[in-house]
Amino acid sequence: MGHQMYKYDAALTDAVFDYCRERLAMDPVPLDYGSLAAIPEHALDGLIGADGNDPGKILNFFEEQLATSVVSIDSPGFLAFIPNAPTKNSLLFDMVVACSGLNGTSWLESAGVVAAENQALAFLANLAGMPDGSGGAFVSGGSMGNLSSLTVGRDVGRARRPLIAPHELRFAISSDAHSSIGKALHVLGVGALLVEPDDHRLTRATLETALANDPRPESVIGIVATSGTTNAGIVDDLEGLGSYANEHEIWFHVDGAYGGAALFSPTHRRLLKGIRHADSFVVDPHKWLLAPLDCAALIYRNPTVARKILAQQASYLDILHTDDDELYEWNPSDFAIHLSRRARGLPFWFSLVTNGTVAYETAIQSAIDLAQRTVRLIESMDHVEMVRPSSLSIVLFRRKGWNAERYNEWSQQLLRDQIAFVTPTKWEGETVARLAFLHPDTPDEMVHQILDSMRD
Ligand SMILES: *Cc1c(COP(=O)(O)O)cnc(C)c1O
């Protein structure tokens, strides 16, 4: 007689699978309302008690009251922030990972799934032009990938510059770098040489000027470049920055959380050629590589160095590390600031393996193509104008004569009308409109509707 909580409940299983089936069959996934559909006050009160509730009722409550107050990030109408558009195969396989409790912590416990995750990482590394043997782990997000990489970069820098006090070491970063970079440096107690790039794109020339004007250039132990800024999609001069880093033996990190996916774009992958110089590279499958949250690929040029710095030491973990077999080098837990982890790379792996790379190329390219058609449309209209050229799949534009309040009202109305979820952003101090395309099923018709909704 097992514990009651482990008894198979066929009716509940059917109900949950029916719910999942219904979501999976939605074409398109509806936006829903986010905080516009705030859940009734006290709706959750008293649910946790000594005796449980009827699961069917709670599933209904979830479906009707909680789930609708989420804006579905996987809807083709979600064009704010950076959307997430998991393929059907990736969602289905995420269920497999969940139901089989797939642990992806160590080679000892999970050799099979780690091998598959590593296949996906090696594929990405190869696409990025990084050498054979590059590798790492899937982590929760770009933020964790950045923090882990910069930890390794810092320690390598300390070893290379033993005469400089650790608290004086710095990374060169652009003022357009993602906020998680600043946060990582804060956690690490490492300073920044903050470079203000021309037109928001960090180049080798700008970096060299900043270093020439800096009193302590030798304290710079690494460069952080962005391959696709989150706000505008701008790709730094990866080739120039990467070759500078190599020539000067400093760490080169490329944050491609959003735009690294353009490696799959036949027209734009050339912008990312310089990633081949990276010591560490991050790209989020949960953004533009069409996998479910939460999944970021963290890849090191020299995984052994990362492992030596980041592996957790504890007597109960010794068995994961003492064996000399080279396969034991591949504990995903050793490559980032984490230990236990689900095999979160597998939904991406399954989708990549089953759909094939051509499907990824066409899906990713379609977002760039839509961005470019949107630019032409905006240029053909009188009430709107481009703020700057589109980059990758992001379009920044302004509605002539609008202030921040007007943009906010319009954004809420679009969601209320279930047309799209578009939020304004700031560009050089000005509130402007921003479209982040990602879902391959976002129709041109929706873009027309969005732009028309900005007329008086
Ligand atoms: C989204 C993003 C991040 C943060 O990634 P998370 O997965 O949200 O933690 C970091 N850098 C860039 C450029 C991003 O677009």
Image (cartoon, grey):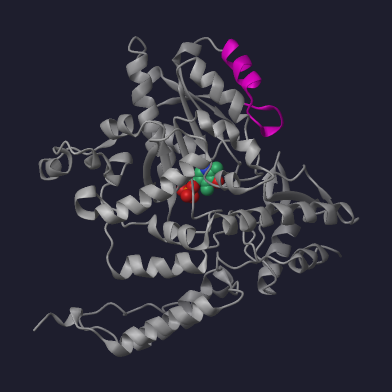
- Depth order, front residue of 178/320: 320
Residue 167 appears left or right of 21: left
Residue 380 appears left or right of 451: right
Question: Looking at the figure, which quarter contains the C terminus?
Answer: bottom right
Tell me, yes or no, whether the highlighted magenta stretch contains residue 160.
Answer: no
Residue 411 appears left or right of 14: right
Q: Residue at x 49, y 82 (%)?
A: 22
Residue 395 appears left or right of 324: right
Give how far across and how far down residue 84 sits, in percent.
54, 59
Q: Quadrant of residue 46?
A: bottom left
Q: Residue at x 26, y 58 (%)?
A: 103
Q: Quadrant of residue 81?
A: bottom right
Majority secondary structure of magenta residues: helix
Q: Residue at x 51, y 28 (%)?
A: 277
- Depth order, front residue of 109/2: 109
Q: Which residues are magenta?
A: 196-212
Residue 83 showing in the rendered view = yes
Give how far across and how far down residue 36 sits, in percent.
59, 71
- Depth order, front residue of 103/168: 103
Relative height, residue 423 to residue 133 (above, below): below
Give how far across and how far down residue 427 sits, in percent.
70, 42
Give how far across and how far down residue 15 sits, in percent.
38, 86
